[in-house]
Image (cartoon, rainbow, N blue to C red):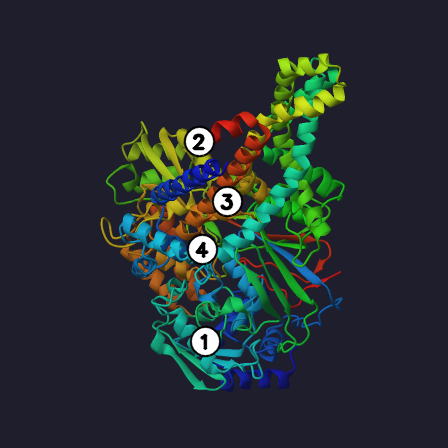
Amino acid sequence: MVDREQRRRFEEYRKNDIGPAENTLLDEFAAGDMDRGEFLKRASLFGLSAAGVSAALGAFGHAPAAWGAREAVKAGGRLRIGILPPPVKGLDPWTYLDLGGLGTGSIAGEFLTRATRTLKLIPEIALSWKPNANATVWTYKLRPGVKFQNGQPLTADDVVATYKRLVDPNSGSQALSAFKGVLSSGGIQKVDSETVAFHLDAPTASFPYLTSSTTYQAIILPANVQAGDFQKGGNATGAFKLTSYTPGVGAKFDRFTGWWGGHAPLDGIDVTFYTAAAAIDAALLGGQIDLINQIQVASDRPLLNNSNVQLFPAKGSTHREICMRVDMHNALSHWQVRQAIALTLDRPAIVKTLFKGLSDLGNDNPWAPAFPSTVKLPQRHKDLRTARQLMAAAGYHKGFSIQLTTEQTGEIPQLAQILQRSVKAIGIKMSLQILTATAYFAGTQSGPPSGWGNTPWLNAPMNITDWGGRAVPDVFLTSAFETKGIWNAPHYSNKAFDKIAKSYLGAISLKDQRKYARQGELILLHDTPTIIPYFYYYLGAGSKSVKGYQANAQGTIFVSHTSLA
Amino acid sequence: MSRFLLKRIGLALVTLVLLSMLVFAIAQLLPGDVGRNVLGPFATQQSVDQLNHQLGVDRPVYDQYATWVDHLSHGDLGESFQYQGSSVWSLLGPALVNSLKLAALAFVLVVPLAIVGGVFAGLREGRISDRVITVTGLSLTAVPEFVTAIVLIVIFGVALKWLPVTAQAPAGSGFFTQVEHLLLPAFALVMVLFGYIARMARAGTIEALDSDYTRTASLKGLSQQTVVRKHVLRNALLPTIAVVATQTGYLIGGLVVIEKVFNYPGIGQRIYTAATNKDFAVLEAGLLIVGVVYLVATLLADILYSALNPRIRHATTE
């Protein structure tokens, strides 16, 4: 039974302290449109306070949230982390595009908010964040008393400068795609020394994720930082200060005693860069390192099922896109043929072979099971009979020949071979062209001959490309599936889908997001410009002595509360 | 002798010039675009073009080469394209030192072992000990070094934990700690090189034992020990010196696989990384350095050869 006074206070809170977006969330929760876990995740997205969340749980008859104290940890020691591969270039956060760079930088750097392993947002540099009625303005209150590791106090000017750099096309920012159509330089405004307002180009309910650790380039830096400064140390706010960095070799971090979060358990972090899976695995098994940032099932089997190794899994949206050009006036221009190819794949077997089951199945659309807005439609499965019927309907009952171009990354070559064998069953002769990643992404990406330049990955008739995970599917929709999307490798164009994607991006309530997600999923299942067979789990690995560490699907390394047993 | 040396040095310089031109030309054939490699697949075309222009890689090849030679003549190896802000020497210098350390340890272990083994086998030609040494050496040479390396790591590093699995000692480590870390990769190299060097030493020993001067020395009544020490060894080791010198280039710049498996930041890995990322500045300087090391090693071998063989010494001075 809810206390009458509690309910009265809760109603006053809803009326006076929160806006329409938050109230919509509470209405949805009350109506049973989401479960408790999703509510907690969405509540963090909209910046609901802990008290507000507790009141809501109580008001709607749920058990209170457990805000228990962390278990006692042992202080001291230096954590030895192996990072594979090394950063491909310098450590300037706004330029991060690879796991090595973002992993290394994230040990020292912090964000406005941090996304946990389950994509719940927690305050970091920002204490709170609130949208206006239609999520076109987000106002962030900064945590007072935060200092950079060089002693400089953090103010709103630093946050404004950081984000202006992220959206500046001339800065070398690798986050342009994340903010395209969402945020422009003029929309980043200082309200006062501890408040920043983001005036968006379009309503974006998921904006807080873009300011979180899931946008790994968004490490808050001093306003006056220059290119090359980060790797000299002192230009971040995190629990560990970078004290030395040698390209291709390693980095060292020492505990930052002025950290706003208090005293981190570890004395420091020693990072060693590796270029071979065998070497990093041997180092962990031989006791020379304590933690590996990321392992792959395909190349790190000695670590799986090893009693001396613990795995740190994180579900996410990392996936591979098997793209089929729809505009080449060949067999692939028929949706029936594309569906037929998709129906030749035995996805559970693929996931078992490539990931030992540590993966979600994909259903040929970018709404990964990890996203709360994803609507679970019937899973596409192997069906050769229907595949052959579709091929015949398109006039290709005898099959055809095609070349698949892809990159030597992770398990992609094996996936290509599986696809090659699978489509043989419906008469398709597929030859494989497997390039180095350098060659695969070489060339131009804009302009003639087709608007996507001449780079293989955006122009090959059929290709497989790796896509890193995101906290929300927004970038996938705008870049890979919208008409003229900059990374729209199948050159897909469907006006109905474009409209649905736009509606999805602007939807605030989970109910509306799900409505549009369902429509988008159905269109893509029919048209199948791209096959997405799986969303595999991000895996970290470490010795049993590592305590309090959680991996996340983006690859950032958060060790402020980690300790060694 | 001095004429001989001058002639060799002159030839070495010409070789280096040709090497630099060849490397420059071949590097242009590498797939990919420098600016795209540095900025990544998602950078705008405009920023890629801007970076290419800034680095000067959109100029004609001969123009780029001329600029590079000009800078090199002033001792400036330039800046890395991949790690902007880092000089080429700051990347290659420590890598070269690492490679020299590993090569030195491998040499110290393999050369005496292989020479002793080869001479011993040659002195006992046809006997069981000869067969054991020859077959063992051949078998180890036939096994690829990365296989040997993995086996050593699994046994001595992971299972027994007797030796560290990574070759790079922590910064500030003393001499013996560094040696300890380098033992496993050095053993892998010993296994690869032992067979080849031992067989050359064995062949040289057998040939020297069969020669007239050895027979004369024995017939003069000299002990076998004296015959071997004063007459056989000196002639038997001549081809071995040449073989050891040619392995120097491999040991300094060709250990990419060993460096990868043992995570050792040597010059081989640096050059490989530069090649895959189209970091021309580091690639060309790295290959030139390896070329210099190789030429110095063969020059030293020639000098030693000529010191040991008066026929060579007198032929060059005539």
Q: Which residue is mark 1?
A: A21
- CA separation in Å, label 3 and label 2: 19 Å
Residues at marks 3 and 1 touching, judged by CB atoms closer than 8 Å? no
- CA separation in Å, label 3 and label 1: 41 Å
- The residue lying at 77 percent from left, 19 percent from top is B223
Q: Quadrant of residue B210?
A: top right
- CA separation in Å, label 3 and label 4: 22 Å
Image disc number at residue A410: 3
Q: Which residue is mark 4?
A: A367
Amino acid at dot 4: Trp
Amino acid at dot 3: Gly
Residues at marks 4 and 1 touching, judged by CB atoms closer than 8 Å? no
The tally of labels here is 4
- CA separation in Å, label 2 and label 1: 50 Å
Q: Which residue is mark 2?
A: A421
B20 horizontally vs B286: left or right: left
- CA separation in Å, label 2 and label 4: 27 Å
| Upstream in sequence: badge 2 or badge 4 | 4
A452 horizontally vs A535: left or right: left
Question: Can you tell which of label 3 and label 4 is closer to the viewer?
Answer: 3
Q: Chain of mark 2?
A: A
